[in-house]
Image: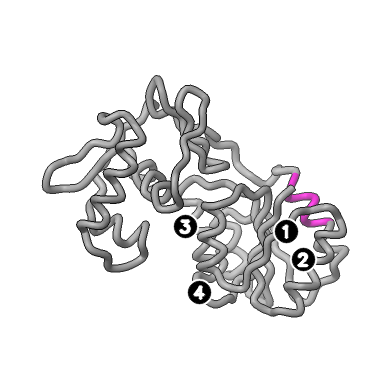
Amino acid sequence: MKILLLEDEYALRVSVEEFLDDLGYEVTAFGNGDDAFDAIYEESYNLLILDVKVPGMDGFALLKSLRERDILIPTLFVTSLTEVDNLEHGFELGCCDYIKKPYDLKELQIRVEYALRRECLHTKKAFIVLDDIYQYDTQNFVLLQEGQQIDLTKTEKRILETLLKHQGSVVSIEAFQKEVWGGDIDPANIRVQINKLRKKLHSELIKNVRGLGYKIDVRQ
């Protein structure tokens, strides 16, 4: 089982990582939310343990972004925040559980084991059927062509996730700038990256809507 840990307190991060390692989990730890978000697109994880207040993208924003893309990895929040509104917000975003600081490592073990049963998640499609040839695995960020995985770069995965999030609608260059790159980038570079992705697929899957942007239609 692979666990991603986001914790900016160094001593606590090391302690939790070593504890979970001893339990037999494969743990990758980060102290910055942006780094953790990138890693989720590079590796498949069975569980996310996210501190809320961290440098870069905070835990709430990270989970919100994942859930908007139908990425349903079970998630625990670790936080010193105790206000009811904060707890409610976390559950609305789709977390499984909260662990309040300070906490005992045995409590962490119990909550991790519960979350890994995936009882906390609503049932959603694990695969999006694009057409007769392609399926997209939303749990592991894998594009399949007749059952065979197509290698995609991290940027290509984000482009595809953005198109699927807005399936049936045109995604503008400005929307790609915000959702894939998080800021200004030369529109020509965006088109180059999209065209690289299109070349890995059959030409009609991602449609170029001249003057407006790009869209993808999927089978319902």
Report the mark closest to the observer, 4 or 2: 2
Q: Quadrant of the C terminus?
A: top left
Q: Quadrant of residue 10?
A: bottom right
Give the side of residue 126 with respect to residue 6, left or right: left
Q: Answer whether residue 15 is visible to the viewer in this image.
A: yes
Report the mark closest to the observer, 2 or 3: 2
Tag 2–tag 3 contact (CB < 8 Å)? no
In the rendered structure, which disc, 2 or 3, sits on the residue that comes first in sequence? Answer: 2
Residue labelled with disc 1: 27
Instruction: Give residue 68's position: percent from left, percent from top.
Output: 45, 51
Instruction: Give residue 107's position: percent from left, percent from top.
Output: 84, 63
In magenta segment, residue 189: no
Residue labelled with disc 2: 17
Q: Residues within 10 Å of mark 2 (few under 14, many from 20)?
A: many
Instruction: Give residue 73's position: percent from left, percent from top.
Output: 61, 49
| Element type at mark 1 | strand
Q: Quadrant of residue 15?
A: bottom right
* The residue stretch that appears in magenta: 110-116
Q: CA distance from mark 1 to mark 2?
A: 6 Å
In the rendered structure, which disc, 1 or 4, sits on the residue that comes first in sequence? Answer: 1
Q: Amino acid type of disc 2?
A: Glu
Q: Amino acid type of disc 3?
A: Ser
Tell me what residue is drawn at x 75 percent, y 54 percent.
Answer: 26
Q: Amino acid type of disc 4?
A: Gly
Q: CA distance from mark 2 to mark 3?
A: 25 Å
Tell me what residue is drawn at x 56 percent, y 58 percent.
Answer: 39
